[in-house]
Every structure is written in structure tokens, then in C-alpha cells.
Image (tube, rainbow, N blue to C red):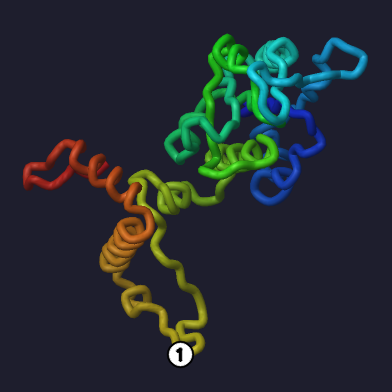
Amino acid sequence: MTWQATILTLFPEMFPGPLGLSLAGKALREQRWAVDAMDIRGFATDRYRTVDDTPFGGGAGMVMRPDVLDAACAAAQARNPGAPLVYLTPRGRLLDQALVRELSTGPGVVLLCGRYEGVDQRVIEARGMLEVSAGDFVLSGGEPAALLLLDACVRLLPGVMGGVASGAEESHGAEGLLEYPHYTRPAEWQARRVPDVLLSGHHAEVARWRRAEAEAATRMRRPDLWDKHLRNELARPARLDGHPAAA
């Protein structure tokens, strides 16, 4: 079954965009996933194809109308039954690798890309939308965030990445740690040498070094992830020697 992405947007020409290239593009051509961009303006009912109006209570900007969006959502969900309806918004749950894995194992996603000041709250509630944020910053619309989410999901689909282990060993992998440093030839460059352990051929020592580097980078750069990692480690069942059991 092909993983289906249905996008509700005012700018359908933005898709697949960069997702038509590289790994995602190859997977798209191989029909491992599919994308269907639907123009929200096609669900407007007036001659001007109006999708927004002034906010009740006053204020700057415009708000996307609930009646137009509800009709668009109904059509998108009919095309992609069973897929969660995700509204991309700065006020949503922060997108992380756990959510990406969850979405990539389902039938696909329906993504609502907001514009202007946002979306009428009533349609969010009526449709039970999952609100998701790409980060603590503001974009001009939900489309760039949708591209980011889709890229993260598509690369986890079966057959998309070349190595089975590569997805688990990279940043934010199974244990939530940042990735360890990488090196390649030449072994010495501008008087900087590759760490000796990586040249030793001792696989167990290499694994220990990489683990230590990943932990150090996470602890220093992302204390929030490090705290979460420690909590997860404490929650894992202990082995007979008192250490957390391997996953």
C-alpha cells in the first residue's frame, strides 16, 4: 500500500517541490509514496474564491474561514481515508522523531497549510486536527513546514533508505541522542587527524567511542534531549547487573 500525502494549500504548485528530488523523489517515482496537493480556493463558494475574513474582536490580519476549510478537509479525508489530519501551526505540538515514526507507519497524512493569521478555531475542534509545529519560529505559511514533515516521514518508509541501520544510528535515533561526529579520507587534513580509535579496526571500541561522543554532544548542545534520554533510561527495565536492559 502506497503511503499517501494529501496537502491542503493555497499554493499547490509548491508540491512536491524539493521532494521531487533525491531520495524522496526516487521513492515518489517508485510509488513508495504519493502526494496530492489540493487548492483550498477550489472550495470557496463566492465568485472571488474568498478563503479568509476579518477576525472577530478586531486585530491585524485575516483568518481562514471555517466553512471553506471544512469542505476542503472533508474532500481531502475522503481521498485519504484513515490518515490523520494535521494542521501545521506554531502553537502545535513540536514535531519530533517519535511523531515522525508514528506518522510514517500509518497510511499517510492529510496536511493543512495555514496562511494569514491562522485558522478559525471551530474547524480545528470540529475536525479533531492534530496541531503540529516545526519549531519555535514563524513562517509565512504552513507549506515549508509540510515539506519538512514529509521529508522526515518519507525517508523512513520501507525501501527508501539504502541501509536498514542508518535511520536508527543518526541524530534523534532510537535513543534520542544527537549523532556522533563523522570522518572520512584523508586521515590527516590541515594538521587535523581522525581520532585514532576510528582507524583501529576495533569495532567494539569504535561503538563505545561513538556512544560517548553522542552522549557528550547531546548533554552539551541539547540539555532538554539529554534530560529526556536520562528519564527514558531510568524507565527501562533493569538487567540482573542493575543496568538498564538493552532495547
Residue at 62%, 39% (x, y): give it: 145
Q: Residue 107 location, x and y as percent?
A: 57, 23
The residue furthest front is: 58
The amino acid on which the numbered mark 1 sits, given as a three-letter code, is: Ala
Q: Which residue lies furthest to the left in this view?
A: 241
Where in the figure is residue 95, as x and y percent of width and height? 49, 37
Q: How many labels does the image show?
A: 1
Residue 213 against residue 30 in the figure, above or below: below
Q: Position of residue 92 (x, y in %)?
A: 51, 30
Image quarter (top left, top right, bottom left or bottom right) of the N terminus: top right
Q: Tell me: 110 left or right of 228.
A: right
Name the residue located 45 percent from the left edge and 40 percent from the top edge: 97
Q: Is mark 1 on a helix, strand or loop?
A: loop
Residue at point 39% right, 62% down? Answer: 180
Instruction: Identify whether 207 is placed above or below 99.
Output: below
In terms of depth relative to the viewer, which is nearer, 76 or 9?
9
Residue furthest to the right: 47
Q: From the image, tell me which residue sits under label 1.
A: 191
Residue 112: where, in percent of width, then height? Answer: 66, 26
Residue at the (75%, 37%) spot, across then down:
15
In this view of the protein, which residue sits in the foreground, 90 or 13? 90
On the rendered structure, is 71 left or right of 222?
Answer: right
Badge 1: few (under 14), some or many (20 or more) residues near its Cα, within 10 Å?
few
